[in-house]
Amino acid sequence: MRILLVLLFSLLAGASAAKDLRIGYLSLLDDPRYQQDWGYARLIVPPPIRSVDGARMAISDLAFVTDSLDLHPVLDARETGPDTLTASLQAMVADGAGVIVLDLPAPLVEAAAKASADLPVVLINATAPEDSLRSACYPTMLHSGPSLRMIMNGFAQYLRAMNWINVLVLVGEHPSDPGLADAFTYSAERMRLTIVASRPFTLAANPEAREGNNVKLLTADADYDVVYVADTRGEFGRYISYSSQLPRPVIGSVGLTAQAWHWAMEHDGAMQVSSRFDKMTNGRMMSSADWSVWVAVKSVITAFTKGPDGDQADILAVLKSSKFSLDGSKGVLLSYRDWDGQLRMPILLATSDAIIAIAPIEGDLHPMTLLGTLGTDQPKLACD
């Protein structure tokens, strides 16, 4: 009888033991996207972005759910270099991570997708906006951060709604700047906006470069309603507002920006999200990268609670299901597109300290959901 009681107690204890959910997070050591060491006048340096904070907050936010289900989320956070990417992925999967959230530049996200093709793991690209990653249609990759086209469609919808039809485009010297300008031009032309001119600018201070480094000259001899600036580093763009030849608004990398998240969002629970992040990080404002990692980990935990007996394939199926949705504190339920893995979401159009508008802008139409007006819709997707 005593033996039977011991066996029964062991079974009950095993049944109630918490089940581990191991979630990977992989970032790039000394990621150049976050090395804002130039600051302003080389004096004011923004605090470093550590998007792993978003992952930790998501686990904390959903503790009331996971505790009730005896589920134990474990965050396996690692940094890697380009040469150790494959080994890092393999090690994380070997240690039990069925899902890995990537905070990596686009070339390394692509490399990760290829390196993990035969591994039992789901990848969630949180911070690389390049549309080429979506059109690659990697079968086990999702994207929790907005695509470049979603961002540019948000701009274009707002300009059309404001009837700011004629746009002057200024393009910087950073390798990413021409891609930003091209993406904006594509979205603008689809919304029947007119690009009156596209002009390169330079940070060179020598007199021979004055046509490229002088805001007055750059913005002269053209009739425009708004100036779009493609300036990844932001060192030149911050001088354009109030200096253009015509008194016009500035959008893009400076002025009015388009983001996944902004601390000035005040409704739909956004203030509580920002406040929790602020408290957890001792005063750092939640960035779009932080939010994209936060919502990625929140997606994984939510999916696992809907199919707790599932493995990697089951989690992916739940995330791509038409029945899956989650609250991102942006006013609507969010869900993943099953054709390219992109998370549907509103885009926030904001200044440094205020939300001016939220795309999709009222008036745009879509047969299924207004969020379908942002990014590449299914009929227009051609997998590479």
Image (cartoon, grey):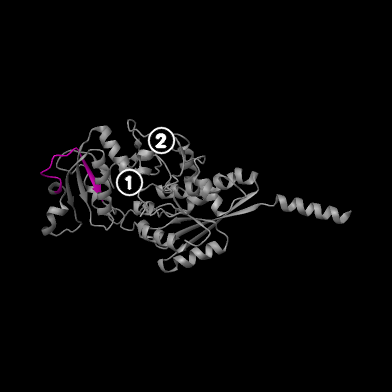
The disc placed on residue 149 is: 1
Identified at 26% across, 45% down, the residue is: 186
Where is residue 156 shown, x and y percent of the image? 28, 39
Q: Is residue 209 magenta?
A: no
Tell how many labels. 2
Identified at 77% across, 54% down, the residue is: 10
Most foreground residue, 74 or 15: 15
Name the residue type under label 1.
Arg
- The answer to whether 119 is drawn above or below residue 66 in the figure is below
Where is residue 273 shown, x and y percent of the image? 48, 41
Q: Secondary structure at mark 2?
A: loop
How crowded is the residue under tag 2: few (<14 C-alpha within 10 Å), some, or many (20+)? Answer: few
* Camera sees residue 57: no
Q: Which residue is mark 2?
A: 369
Q: Is residue 219 magenta?
A: yes
Most extreme residue toward the bottom is: 83
Please state the extent of the stretch shown in magenta in the rendering. Answer: 218-230
How crowded is the residue under tag 1: few (<14 C-alpha within 10 Å), some, or many (20+)? Answer: many
Image check: 159 left or right of 374? Answer: left
